[in-house]
Amino acid sequence: MSLPTDDSTQDWSMKPTPRQWKAWLLTDTPASRRQAALGRAYRRWRQFSRNPLSLFGLAILLLLIAVAAFGPMLVSEDPLRQVLAERLMPPGTATHWFGTDQLGRDILSRLVHGARLTLSIAILVVVLVVPVGLLIGTTSGFCGGFVDTVLMRLTDVALAFPKIVLALAFAAALGPGVLNAVIAISITAWPPYARLARAETLRLVQADFIHVARLQGASPARILLRYIVPLCSSSVLVRATIDMAGIILAVAGLGFLGLGAQPPSPEWGYMVASGRNVLLDAWWVATIPGLAILFVSLAFNLLGDGLRDVFDPRHGG
Amino acid sequence: MSTPLTALGRLRALTARRRGVRWTLALARWAAMLVITFTGLLAITFFIGRKIPIDPVLAILGDRASASAYAAARLELGLDKPLIEQFIIYVRDVLHGHLGMSLLTANPVIDDIRRVFPATLELATLSIIVGVAIGVPLGVIAAVRHNRWIDHVARVVGLIGSSVPVFWLALMGLLLFYARLHWVSGPGRIDPVYDGMVDTKTGSLLVDSLIAGEWDVFANAFSHIVLPAGILAFYSIAYLSRMTRSFMLDQLSQEYVTTARAKGLSERRVIWRHAFGNIAVPLLTVIALAYSYLLEGSVLTEIVFAWPGIGSYLTGALLNADMNAVLGSTLVIGATFITLNLLTDALYRVFDPRAR
């Protein structure tokens, strides 16, 4: 069935109705590159939004981003201000919705400020790790031969290491701190990306358009950067979304051990650790930040699963 | 001269020899991978120990040491030698079990680890047993009843298992089952009253107390281990049920299953003999992986439960900058992890003809 492509959709002087927009987006015969790209994005969105769980994940993440961006302006309470007279107040009081910790600091305010920290650490790790993985993987797949063997053996070796324990050792050696935690996690997180990028590259290298580009005299670097890397990125980004969940757990784990962000900074893992000593008297101090970690990590998992179904139907099911 | 029969015989001998060569090659490759990976691990711990901010000499002597004491200690540690020679000496030491002295306990690190590692192994082993016993059947049933309620249960378990921080779940478990409901004993491996009542034979308190016939000790140890093991097992259940489900879905959509059903085989036989039989090998490798993850996951769990295993030892050392103990524990956990990983890989190649 061919979709109605009446002239009015092309006529920009008239305001198109939603139905015409839809027809324009879903047409089988896009008139321009932009229309094709937008149409593809729209189809993907339709497929993605059919899954309520993925939408739920997306909603939590949008909320998290909003909280990280604007939250600190909305909560009036200073996350570091100690009011010892108001220690360990239970959740639900008018001034402290989520209660206070053993130093009388407002937990809601600490959570909100901690969202910024958690999100930026996770993004920093991905920003550090993805390019490295992409570079190693695509180079390995593209060059083949000796380079491939060396790089892939290196990746295999790195994959065989225990991640968390090595991150702990690195964090211990580098000294505690947010940046060192990021480095420690990044060092152990790149190998899966290299594997993935290599597999994608091997699939792409044989394609006709790569041969054409080569015949036209494109340099290997150009083919790699302009043709292969962009085409690998969607599956790598899907993988990164799912990985975010694990990264957030690792960051929180380091924080819990006292190797991540240092007190009094409102890092969620550290907040759980500080609630441990008063667990029996004031359950909320450890419980609430833990729930926050759980929800954010769950959201990344749900979003990642949804994106994978859209971009990579091979792994569906 | 050659009759067809001997020609066939020769062909057989040739293929047999070729297969032998291929096996030897694969084995050599695997051994090389093992050596390379271990060397990599050693290089990392060596690098962390020697090259990262904390000066190893100052770590031992403190920063008020005189210049001559500093130089003497430097010489004693072999830090004046070329880096590669230092590394070779380091590898030799590790292979002889010399992991240095712990600053915290003043014992050789290897002795400390020998003392604490059995507690971790006991915890991880009990967890994997529970994880397999529940996770694998759950995965199979979820695949068979695809998109029914049990499948949704399996999915939710899998999702939560990969989203919940283990240290937090452990705290919540303590709060609920120990503090509120009093179903289990609190932190630690055993009540102090029972400590040292049974001889250490296997290192597992449960097994040792059974051997000795001390039922009180067994019951007490069990009430201590059941919560941490349950928490860790939850992660195995999540991982194993997810993997089993996806393996089974893959098999059940294939034509031989339809054929088996069309032949009139019972559903039970189709599922458990035919489909499940085909996923046994990948499943075994996944179980081994799950076990190695448990060894890692036990680090954070042990702290919450004050479980006297290698995780508690490692973190105690971490917070006191006891680098010999940190690197020693990292090496031991890493070596166990790598061995399991590579054994799994080998297992896969031996039993799955497609992977050869």
Image (tube, coloured by chain):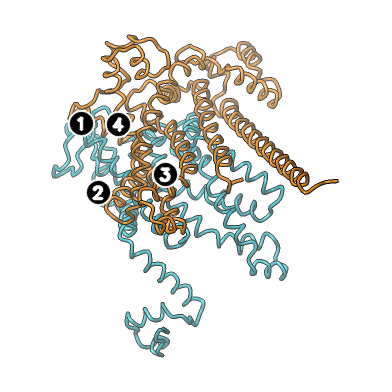
Chain colours: A cyan, B orange
Q: Which mark is residue A84?
A: 1
Q: Nearer the viewer, mark 3 or mark 1?
A: 3
- The residue tagged 4 is A274
User: Judging from the image, what secondary structure is the residue with disc 1 in?
Assistant: helix
Circle 2: residue type = Val
Tell me where residue A24 sits by quadrant.
bottom left
Q: Disc number at residue A246?
A: 3
Q: Nearer the viewer, mark 2 or mark 3?
A: 3
**First reached walking from the N terminus: tag 1 or tag 2:** 2
Q: Which structural element holds mark 3?
A: helix
Does label 4 lie on the same chain as label 3?
yes
Query: Secondary structure beneath disc 4?
Result: helix
Which is more foreground, mark 2 or mark 4?
Answer: 4
The residue at the far bottom in this view is: A7
Instruction: Indicate the position of residue A268 as horizontal and vertical percent values.
Output: 33, 40
Mark 1, Cα crowd under 10 Å, few <14 / some 14-19 / many 20+, is few
Disc 2 vs disc 3: Cβ atoms closer than 8 Å? no
Distance of mark 1 from mark 4, alpha carbons? 16 Å
- Mark number, residue B138: none
Earlier sequence position, callout 2 versus callout 4:
2
Left or right: residue B167 compared with residue A241: left
